[in-house]
Image (tube, helix red, strand yellow):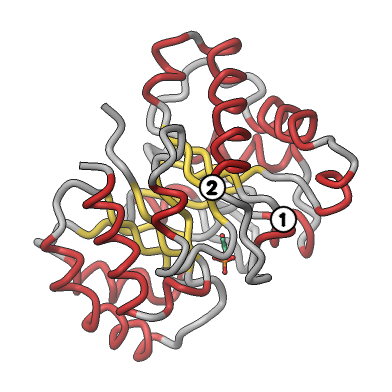
Amino acid sequence: MRVPMIAGNWKMNTTVSEAIKLVNEMRAGLDEITNVDKVICPPFISLAAVRELIKGSSIKLGAQNLYFEEKGAYTGEISPLMLADLCEFVIIGHSERRQYFNETGEIVNKKVKAALRAGLKPILCIGESFEENEAGRTEEVVTEQLMASSARIYYLSGLIIAYEPVWAIGTGRAATGKQANKTIGFIRRTVSEKYGKRIARDVRILYGGSVTAENAAEFMNQPEIDGALVGGASLKANEFLSIVRQTSKIKQ
Ligand code: PEP
């Protein structure tokens, strides 16, 4: 059985004090729900404070990025070892990083390997652009991204995949549940071809792209979709809680 997961990507939002306030608003409500993995991913600078706040609760912590070297002269970067000391998950290959920071498949692959080596659980993001979608290239693009990201990785233990069509991220224009379910089913079959049936059966694949309290049920009702990576709506305590609560009911 795959435990459903709702992960909140706060992106470059919240100061440390705002992060503390937001966690305080959602902590009790999230903690109550036990059949869903609830992961919050605040900016790096708030990880330590948030970790203290959620200690003893069932809420899990993730980072939004990492550098692939363990340590050294890489001014301004954050290493997998530093993160492994603070949190359990790390988002890798988000389309905003691919788009604005030129992260290639090779870089994403190095990051995934470095995260796994450090014992972190990567939330690997893949997804096609609007043009690729229009051209009917979705399956080709997600296969290419998945293969590049997982090159020379022989065991996917702990890895989570987030299918995030780029055209749906932060646009308010989500995919339909059916579309997302179809592509996620395809991704699972691709994982099966590379890693075998057991791993494909166990790997959690989330949908991401304009998930809100209003449309969450549509995605969670789909059999292939194991949860969501939520951006904008994860910054509102009540909305994030509502998404987690709906997931808990639907996936029980
Ligand atoms: C994201 O940042 O991964 C995301 C899906 O954002 P949004 O929910 O705002 O579209």
Mark 2: give few (<14), some (14-19) or many (20+) Cα within 10 Å: some
Give whichever of 218, 70 is nearer the camera.
218
Q: Amino acid at mark 2?
A: Gly
Left or right position of 26 against 213:
left
Which quadrant contains ligand 1?
bottom right
Q: Is residue 149 above or below residue 84?
A: above
Q: Is residue 110 above or below residue 20?
A: above
Label 2 sits on residue: 177
Residue 116 % position (x, y): 46, 34
Q: Is residue 103 above or below residue 21?
A: above
Figure quadrant of residue 82: bottom left
* Helix, strand or loop under label 2: helix
Kindly check if marks 1 and 2 are in contact, taking CB atoms under 8 A apart as contact: no
In the rendered structure, find residue 27 and report the number of the disc placed on it: none
Q: Amino acid at mark 1?
A: Val
Residue 163 % position (x, y): 59, 44
Left or right position of 6 against 25:
right
Q: Earlier in the sequence, mark 1 or mark 2?
A: 1
Badge 2 residue CB within 8 Å of ligand 1: no
Mark 1: give few (<14), some (14-19) or many (20+) Cα within 10 Å: many
Seen at 42% across and 64% down, the residue is: 8
Label 1 sits on residue: 166
Give whichever of 86, 17 is nearer the camera.
17
* Helix, strand or loop under label 1: helix
Residue 89 % position (x, y): 39, 49
Left or right position of 10 against 143:
left
Figure quadrant of residue 145: top right
